[in-house]
Image: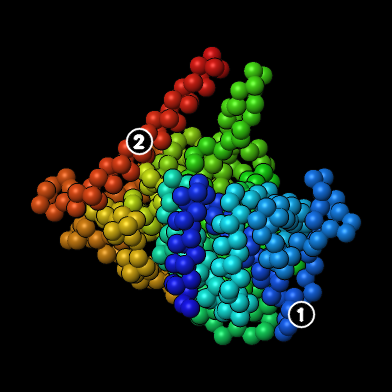
Amino acid sequence: MTEATIVSKIWNLANVMRHDGVGYGDYLEQITYLLFLKMVDELNKPPYNRNLKLPRLKDVEGKEVEGAEVCSWENLTSKNGAELESFYIQALRSLGTEKGMLGQIYVKSQNKIQDPSNLQRIITMIGKEDWSLMGADVKGTIYEGLLEKNAEDTKSGAGQYFTPRALIRTMVACVQPKPMKTVIDPACGSGGFFLAAYDWLTENNKLDKDEKMFLKNSTFHGNEIVASTRRMCLMNLYLHGIGEIDAEPLVKSNDALIAAESQTYDYILANPPFGKKSGMTVTNEDGDIEKEDISYNRQDFWETTSNKQLNFLQHIKSLMKIDGQAAVVLPDNVLFEGGAGEEIRKQLLKTTELHTILRLPTGIFYANGVKANVLFFNNKPANKEAWTKEVWFYDYRTNIHHTLKKKPLAESDLSDFVACYNSSNINKRKETWSEENPDGRWRKYSYDEIIARDKTSLDIFWVKDQSLTDLDNLPDPDVLALEIIDNIEAGLASFREIVSELEKSEEIN
């Protein structure tokens, strides 16, 4: 059975579950729990004989019950009806108290399938496949397919953890990571950047034994604070052959912004959360739930701010080794916001070589209203002079129209950018813009030109917007409608920020 057939088979059952009130995200979580248990069972049998230990059922306080059954696939499949449901609930709770990757896969796990017969159907479906015999590429493709389908369910909000794979692969193709180097994503979602880097490393290098072991166990590092997303990331990595069941998880559960890391890394590939404000949910004196802004007071940050993306940008700088490389997706406000934003941009230009900015179109992310860019920069040692001499901009937004369903972003759409980026020697680039060709999308601005701009703004466009002058070449109505929605969403988000700031100002006064 091909991976496409398996994905279709698994997802068809998801549609059946939907009628019983089980959302796509909940269904995918249950698939993850059961698939992991099935693979442990396979690895404990010949020819693997891994002897991976599973706990016995535990009580509500997390203490193992003497004489209780082991939380194994074999014991799970020997039951049905109410007995199956009861065992499954207890097993999830028990597995979630374990240490290492096992505990992280099952932490805060719950049974969301209330009908035991549906649970039996999923178990039967997973049980028919021998997952350990499948190649990592096949298993990985299947799970990635499920993650993408889940991201397409916009109501669930899962799309915010799923960066378009065409964009990720383009970013990795520009950075071109090398073997025996480390990669970190401080907001890794479902692990897309890790997998693209893994594919690049295996497809473009003939790895020896030591390099393969380093790639499997030591290359990738990350943070993801949402438990459900973290478990899917760990599962995604494991199915692709990254990490070990009985080892410490490669993805940490703590908030990456709280404190500086104890080590630095060679490559940072990331798409931090889209939300502008860092915040936490608290209960006030009246018992009402409120959201409280967080300003991370870190000595290694240039500026203290509650702007989440500006904090992530500062944190990413702190993660970089000298000569480390970063490729980061960031929203427009990072390019033009005043106050802390202006100072952070100045420091970034001074302390790193910010050499490239890719302006992205709307309609490529699963979250509406996102106007984003990719910033490429290299870390440098302390220096009196600014390390950035010029910044190259590629405008892939003006007059570009994409939708998730009818015209999703493809790698080929960004092939011209990759060619212009010229990874082999970024110091030998050539502009496609000129006075004679004002619509060329590849243009550089000097450090002095940028510093002279109001608020040191990096929000730069020069290609003429055809929709303002050429009514005969407007995009299809459905594309226009989605762009209008995106613009309204972006406007509403900005308006909410203004209202929030005004309310805080009134409270202070």
Spot the residue most to the left. Answer: 472
- Residue reaching furthest right? 66
Amino acid marked by disc 2: Gly
- For image coordinates 56% across by 68% down, the residue present is 125
Relative to 167, say whether 467 is above or below.
above
Which residue does the numbered mark 1 point to in the structure image? 49
Drawn side of residue 122 relative to residue 494, left or right: right
Q: Earlier in the sequence, mark 1 or mark 2?
A: 1
**Label 2 Cα neighbours within 10 Å, binned few <14 / some 14-19 / many ≥20:** few
**Looking at the rendering, which quadrant does residue 36 occupy?**
bottom right
Give whichever of 55, 176 is nearer the camera.
55
Residue 219 visible here: no
- Three-letter code for the amino acid on which mark 1 is drawn: Asn
Residue 290 in picture, x, y percent from top left: 58, 27
Rendered image: mark on residue 418:
none
Please say whether residue 103 is visible from this viewpoint: yes
- Residue in the picture at 48% in, 60% down: 13
Residue 379: percent from left, percent from top? 56, 59
In front here: 75 or 48?
75
In the foreground, 83 or 247? 83
How much space separates mark 1 and mark 2, taking CA atoms?
58 Å
The residue that disc 2 covers is 491
